[in-house]
Image (cartoon, rainbow, N blue to C red):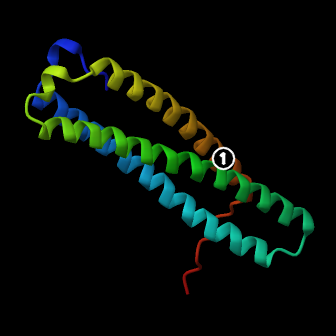
Amino acid sequence: MIIPKFMIDSSTISSEVEILNNILNQQRQLKKTLLLYLEKISDGIFNASDPEDVNSLISCLNSIRKSFENIKENINNLIELKQFLENTLKTTGYLNTFDCETYNKSFSELFKKITEDNIFYYTFMESLLKYMKVIFPENN
């Protein structure tokens, strides 16, 4: 969220920390999902007998690696922004000198990057659908 220059108080900063926590949790969940796919695709490579399948799965691994690195960087940047705001709350009188323009610029750039990285992530997940097959257990 963008913090208006004229509305800087501890409540505004706390709300912003909560927003960053929500985005951080979302990024952590995406990272956890990527790790699960990494495990499944690694098993697929191990069990694949067709070289074409192996090449496709290796390509998937490369996409997972790229997405994982992007998400990891996003998490680190979110933590930095969050710590900056939390330190702002702890420091007496700092709200008067809070540089909302610098924070807003950092947040906007990070939010744009997260949006682009999420698009890459969801496009990758969509591309995996061609490899998926749902198997329902038979009732005996």
Q: Which element type, helix, strand or loop, lies under badge 1?
A: helix
Q: Is residue 52 left or right of residue 58?
A: right
Relative to 34, is 95 above or below? above
Q: Please provide percent x and percent y for residue 94.
A: 14, 28
Q: Is residue 92 left or right of residue 116?
A: left
Farthest residue to the bottom: give it.
140
* Residue position for label 1: 124
The one nearer the camera, 57 or 16, is 16
Picture residue at 33% right of the left edge, 26% below the top: 103
Q: Which part of the image, by quadrant, shows the C terminus?
A: bottom right
Binning the other alpha carbons within 10 Å of mark 1 as few (below 14), some (14 to 19) or many (20 upward) gives some
Q: Is residue 94 left or right of residue 112?
A: left
Q: Please provide percent x and percent y for residue 27.
A: 44, 48
Q: Is residue 31 left or right of residue 26?
A: right
The one nearer the camera, 126 or 107, is 107
Q: Which part of the image, by quadrant, shows the N terminus?
A: top left
Q: Please provide percent x and percent y for residue 134.
A: 63, 65
Relative to 120, is 99 above or below? above
Amino acid type indicated by mark 1: Phe
Q: Quadrant of residue 10?
A: top left
Picture residue at 11% right of the left edge, 25% below the top: 9
Q: Quadrant of residue 37?
A: bottom right
Q: Please provide percent x and percent y for residue 112.
A: 49, 28
Picture residue at 31% right of the left edge, 44% below the top: 22
Q: Quadrant of residue 41?
A: bottom right
Picture residue at 40% right of the left edge, 21% below the top: 105
